[in-house]
């Protein structure tokens, strides 16, 4: 006998609290693109450096890194004398990333849980922290700027 | 290519040889010369709006996109004047379009504006960018329009006016600040827009964006708006110093960053028999967008609202993710192993007690062909019964029957291109614009651009009717009579194609004799269509050089569904409209794989490729391959299974991917049958009404979570690739079937659906040459497919698949509809699909956007009936038939007339589902339920109530048809200066 029984599919299982907190944090970072930037940068570093280097080699166009520096200067937060350090760091970072990326199998983006695992990778953190630090600085600078009314047009 | 089709074009003093008469842009691309262009598109043609593609041709500056390659053409691309003109064009574009690529959702490597400005190496912004006096239009549920970013290329307008032919969009070239308009107004969601997405797909920049992309496309697009604007302003502040290379350097980096995370997978739409293929862009399980591509064989850049925007159901929170077992009056979660063990145990037990024919199997026209193949193999080889069917029984079996009787193959004669190429279409009982939307676009195009004529027979004023050249409204269920009367008139007046009949058709004289009673006068009496009108239509059909017949459920879902299908095939044969291009019969297959489910043997009497189970030689072939004995007797079909359950002949049922409890006719009777079953297994992705009566529920996977093939209405195989992993806990249906067979002791070992296809192709001669390699990417094959891979875009070019190669006319009698109106049941309830919903709605109801367009079910009532019954839009009424009753809100509309009402299929519960009203009557030849024959009465429950459709629904708005983008109006503007002349206010156009 197969009389109808109603069944509510339960909401996806709730994780334990600590894990939940961490996931929420991760999710926020993810939502705001921070982790995506990091992940994507790692995944794409070969492409990115190729583009940067190709750009730098074009006589008529300015060196992209210089342009990035210009941007940072415009923010008025980086003293000009530190620019040399910055560009050296960027170049070195890119080179290292290129080597690293070549060694890694090109795999799928790690996703949220993958990222969670990555978070426990010390070496990765130390590699990423300057980048994240830079981003944080960048975001702060932006925060300090007054919002223009036009902003709402691109909500 | 023969020399006659080649030409020599001189380009900057180089002589280049290539195909003649193709657009110059394509010709040059063939020689690796990239002529910058934005508004030109292979599908849309030369719109001539962007002013970027200038060349000097025959001594004059001309827009390159407007030229075609021809012998003797001389053009200058590197000519200084042309270069200046192109630069001026590009400068105007960036005056209208702010380049903030790194934070733009469209910066994915395929943004045409970005690519052109970069390739042209535009060093800096010459004209300042100016905002337009319009807010971003965020009103539409699926896309957003930003006039500030719109370059007024008109692609969206062309796509809407001339590809989709809904004719909503225009550009007000004469206004002070031209922009894109919806029905002449500024709010996208208050318009006739049917959300097909063409405009968004073709927009060369981010002016029209899918909302699912917003903030999701790249690492930086996720930036909150409060940061985004300052970031843009910041970059714009440094841009005068550093020029565009900065912007492009950053945006190229950004675009490269996006690539690893954005996955683009080819898939095939699961929502109708048209078979649109496209790329789905995803990040993990997030669907970023559906991106149609030019090379898709069926649809090119086209989609409808469901295919483009209706996929969020796959991430719905109430997906089934674990097997369920009925236990003590409730369902409990179970492991796969336990579920399989229980199924094997109960199947074996029932088989032992009652024999194999006490078990039955229903495959799904939504699942892949490989899955249908396995379902029939499970029934035949593992259990030993031919009780296997699929839900095409509910829609298309009569059409197949009609074709088998006359022309031989149960499939559309030709391709969609044949429909588009025909001079005349006879469309009967097919709401093509809503049920097969992308095919409808091709028909509307042919009508609008090439003067194709449409004769449309329908009860309801749907879009095909509104656009028809001739519309007839026969009394319900009487199509056979008017079609036969037209045929008789043709013979009586010597208008038949005698030569064709003599050469290619049998049983002509016998058929003519059978027509005797079908005079025009008799037809007028039965159908209500004037005799003279029918005579006129007959002449119109006879004089058309090529004609196709299109039909759908309005024909098939009647007690005489097979006969009316046969009559249409007869008509095509009598007029010689078969066996040559642009002719033939085209029943519109409803679901994505209606064709494939039957093609691959999920039918009680046929093996894959339609070979008879009763044929000893064929059966032996399968027995040898599978190493089992197969019964020779035909099994029960979907519809007769229900009766067999009531009669205690069937004890167990295994339903895959079908909401049988709601979609079979006389749903109460079906549900009562399920109550009687000893054992019911339901495999689905949601807990459906059918699941409620199951003993075991197995969580399957939707199309995007598995591989396989679908066969569309043109008999075309297309491959779907796995877009994302199955949701944890779910399995692809082919794998579930493999494991169930394993639990029953069968040595199945399929690792991939390609192995299933290989097996089927090795056994069914009709698919001999089908393989995954031959279907790679966007490649496709139309059956029959010979072993060497040769396929058949148009059947019957070399005769018909009967012994002497001839088709046959099939004599018919008229069987009137089963359910007749009387004093108690005085309302005829028609029913069918809506554009925004799919079948009963288990998938589409879980798409937020689609649901917002049509929040619930309703009944369309004519103004006349509404006045007589004192109801209005929003009133709650009961529809009561002899079989049950439903409650629905009223929508008063002139789409229906008199006492004919229309209820969409769109409901998943007994309160609202149309099949509570349908009878158990069925087509006498195919057992397809006579869904379209409902007599009911209407009782008013409450006069005042909420309108069932939101006022923004496209059905309430009036389109603004025009011939196209009307670029000449832009040129007529006072302030328009032709490049290289400098524009005074370039941001205005
Ligand atoms: S109907 Fe709507 S979505 Fe389709 S092209 Fe027109 S405006 Fe765009
Ligand atoms: S919205 Fe239309 S006119 Fe504007 S850029 Fe996009 S396709 Fe062109
Ligand atoms: S539902 Fe049909 S027409 Fe719409 S996109 Fe899917 S296959 Fe194409
Ligand atoms: S491509 Fe020729 S004007 Fe736009």
Image (cartoon, coloured by chain):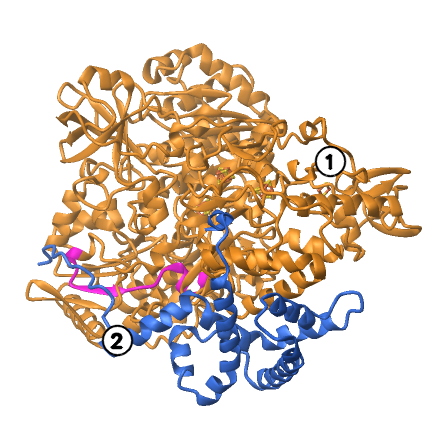
Tint applied to chain B in the drawing = orange
Q: Which corner quadrant holds the C terminus of chain B?
A: top right
Give the camera-side residue of B621 and B102.
Answer: B102
- Mark linked to residue B743: 2
Q: Position of residue B341 (x, y in %)?
A: 20, 75
Q: Over which residues does the magenta segment extend?
A: B692-708
Label 1 near ligand 4 (CB < 8 Å): no
Q: Say whether residue B511 is visible.
A: no
**Disc 2, SS:** helix
Same chain for labels 1 and 2? Say yes or no.
yes
**Which chain is mark 2 on?**
B
Residue, x 6% and y 66% (percent of image)? B328
Query: Counting other residues with Cα less than 10 Å from the Cα at mark 2, is it few (<14), some (14-19), or many (20 or more)?
Result: some
Q: Position of residue B592 (x, y in %)?
A: 41, 50
- Mark linked to residue B984: 1
Tint applied to chain A in the drawing = blue
Q: Position of residue B246 (x, y in %)?
A: 67, 63
Residue, x 49% and y 75% (percent of image)? A39
Residue, x 19% and y 72% (percent of image)? B334
Find out whether residue B871 is within the magenta segment: no
């Amino acid at each position: 006998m197969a009389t109808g029984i109603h069944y509510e599919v339960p909401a996806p299982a709730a994780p334990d609290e600590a894990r939940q907190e961490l996931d929420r944090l991760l999710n926020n970072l993810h939502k705001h693109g921070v982790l995506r930037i990091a992940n994507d940068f790692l995944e794409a570093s070969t492409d990115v450096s190729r583009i940067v280097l190709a750009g730098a080699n074009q006589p008529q166009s300015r060196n992209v890194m210089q342009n990035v520096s210009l941007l940072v200067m415009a923010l008025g937060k980086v003293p000009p004398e530190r620019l040399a350090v910055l560009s050296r760091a960027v170049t070195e970072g890119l080179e290292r990333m290129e080597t690293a990326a070549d060694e890694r199998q090109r795999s799928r983006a790690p996703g949220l849980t993958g990222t969670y695992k990555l978070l426990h990778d010390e070496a990765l953190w130390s590699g990423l922290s300057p980048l994240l630090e830079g981003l944080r600085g960048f975001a702060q600078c932006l925060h300090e700027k007054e919002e223009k009314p036009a902003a709402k047009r691109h909500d | 290519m023969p020399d006659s089709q080649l030409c020599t074009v001189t380009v900057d003093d180089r002589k280049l040889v290539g195909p003649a008469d193709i657009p110059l842009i394509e010709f040059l691309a063939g020689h690796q010369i990239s002529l910058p262009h934005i508004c030109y598109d292979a599908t849309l043609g030369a719109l001539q709006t962007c002013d970027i593609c200038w060349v000097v041709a025959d001594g004059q500056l001309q827009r390159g996109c407007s030229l075609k390659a021809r012998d003797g053409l001389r053009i200058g691309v590197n000519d200084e004047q042309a270069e200046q003109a192109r630069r001026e064009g590009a400068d105007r574009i960036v005056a209208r379009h702010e380049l903030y690529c790194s934070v733009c959702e469209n910066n994915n490597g395929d943004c045409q504006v970005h690519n052109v400005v970069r390739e042209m190496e535009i060093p800096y912004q010459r004209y300042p960018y100016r905002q337009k006096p319009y807010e971003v239009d965020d009103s539409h549920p699926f896309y957003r329009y930003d006039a500030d970013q719109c370059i007024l290329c008109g692609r969206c307008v062309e796509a809407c006016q001339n590809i989709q032919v809904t004719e909503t969009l225009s550009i007000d070239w004469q206004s002070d600040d031209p922009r894109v308009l919806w029905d002449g107004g500024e709010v996208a969601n208050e318009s006739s827009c049917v959300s097909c997405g063409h405009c968004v797909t073709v927009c060369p920049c981010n002016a029209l964006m899918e909302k699912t992309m917003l903030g999701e496309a790249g690492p930086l697009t996720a930036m909150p708006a409060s940061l985004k604007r300052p970031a843009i302003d910041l970059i714009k502040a440094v841009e005068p110093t550093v020029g565009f290379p900065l912007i492009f350097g950053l945006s190229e980096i950004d675009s490269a960053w996006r690539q690893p995370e954005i996955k683009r997978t080819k898939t095939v739409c699961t929502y109708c028999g048209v078979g649109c293929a496209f790329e789905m862009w995803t990040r993990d399980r997030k669907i970023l967008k559906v991106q149609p591509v030019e090379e898709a064989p069926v649809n090119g850049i086209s989609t409808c609202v469901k295919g483009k925007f209706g996929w969020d159901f796959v991430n719905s929170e109430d997906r089934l993710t674990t097997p369920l077992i009925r236990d003590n009056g409730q369902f409990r979660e179970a492991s796969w192993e336990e579920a399989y063990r229980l199924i094997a145990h109960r199947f074996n037990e029932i088989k032992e007690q009652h024999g194999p024919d006490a078990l039955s199997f229903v495959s799904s026209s939504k699942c892949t062909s490989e899955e249908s193949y396995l379902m029939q193999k499970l029934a035949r080889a593992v259990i030993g019964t031919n009780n296997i069917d699929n839900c095409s029984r509910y829609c298309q079996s009569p059409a197949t029957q009609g074709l088998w009787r006359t022309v031989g193959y149960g499939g559309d004669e030709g391709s969609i291109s044949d429909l588009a190429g025909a001079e005349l279409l006879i469309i009967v009982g097919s709401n093509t614009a809503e049920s097969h939307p992308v095919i409808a676009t091709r028909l509307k195009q042919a009508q609008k651009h090439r003067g194709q004529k449409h004769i449309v027979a329908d009860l309801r004023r749907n879009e095909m009717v509104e656009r028809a050249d001739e519309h007839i409204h026969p009394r319900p269920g009487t199509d056979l009579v008017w079609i036969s009367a037209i045929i008789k008139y043709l013979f009586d007046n010597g208008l038949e194609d005698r030569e064709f009949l003599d050469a290619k058709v049998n049983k002509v004289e016998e058929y003519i004799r059978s027509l005797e009673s079908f005079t025009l006068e008799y037809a007028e009496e039965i159908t209500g269509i004037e005799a003279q009108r029918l005579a006129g239509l007959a002449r119109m059909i006879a004089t058309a050089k090529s004609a196709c017949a299109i039909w759908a459920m309005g024909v098939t879902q009647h007690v005489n569904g097979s006969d009316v299908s046969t009559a249409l095939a007869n008509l095509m044969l009598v007029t010689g409209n078969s066996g040559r291009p642009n002719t033939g019969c085209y029943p519109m297959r409803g679901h994505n794989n209606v064709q494939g489910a039957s093609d691959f043997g999920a039918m009680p009497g046929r093996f894959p490729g339609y070979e008879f189970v009763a044929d000893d030689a064929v059966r032996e072939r399968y027995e040898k391959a599978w190493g089992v004995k197969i019964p020779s007797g035909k099994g029960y079909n979907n519809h007769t299974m229900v009766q067999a359950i009531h009669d205690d002949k069937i004890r167990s049922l295994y339903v895959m991917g079908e909401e049988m409890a709601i979609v079979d006719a006389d749903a109460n009777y079906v549900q009562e049958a399920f109550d009687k079953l000893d054992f019911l297994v339901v495999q689905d992705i949601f807990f459906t009404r059918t699941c409620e009566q199951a003993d075991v529920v197995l969580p399957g996977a939707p199309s995007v979570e598995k591989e396989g093939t679908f066969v569309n209405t043109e008999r075309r195989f297309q491959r779907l690739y796995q877009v994302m992993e199955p949701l944890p806990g779910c399995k692809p249906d082919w794998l579930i079937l493999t494991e169930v067979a394993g639990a029953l002791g069968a040595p199945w070992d399929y690792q991939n659906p390609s192995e299933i296809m290989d097996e089927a192709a090795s056994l069914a001669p009709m698919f001999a040459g089908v393989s995954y390699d031959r279907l790679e990417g966007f490649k496709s094959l139309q059956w029959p497919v010979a072993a060497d891979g040769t396929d058949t875009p148009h059947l019957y070019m070399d005769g018909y698949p009967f012994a002497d190669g001839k088709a046959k006319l099939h004599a018919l009698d008229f069987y009137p509809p089963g359910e007749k109106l009387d004093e108690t049941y005085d309302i005829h309830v028609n029913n069918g699909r809506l554009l925004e919903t799919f079948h009963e709605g288990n998938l589409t109801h879980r798409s937020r956007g689609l649901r917002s367009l049509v929040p619930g079910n309703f009944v369309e009532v004519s103004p006349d009936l509404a006045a007589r019954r004192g109801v209005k839009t929003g009133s709650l009424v009961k529809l009561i038939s002899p079989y049950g009753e439903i409650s629905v809100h009223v929508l008063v509309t002139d789409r229906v007339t008199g006492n004919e009402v229309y209820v969409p299929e769109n409901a998943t519960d007994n309160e609202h589902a149309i099949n509570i009203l349908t009878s158990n009557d069925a087509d006498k030849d195919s057992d397809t339920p006579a869904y379209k024959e409902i007599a009911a009465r209407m009782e008013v429950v409450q006069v005042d109530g909420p309108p069932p459709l939101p006022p923004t629904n496209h059905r309430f708005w009036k389109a603004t048809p025009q011939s196209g983008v009307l670029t000449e109006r832009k040129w007529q503007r006072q302030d328009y200066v032709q490049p290289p002349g400098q524009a005074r206010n370039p941001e205005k156009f």
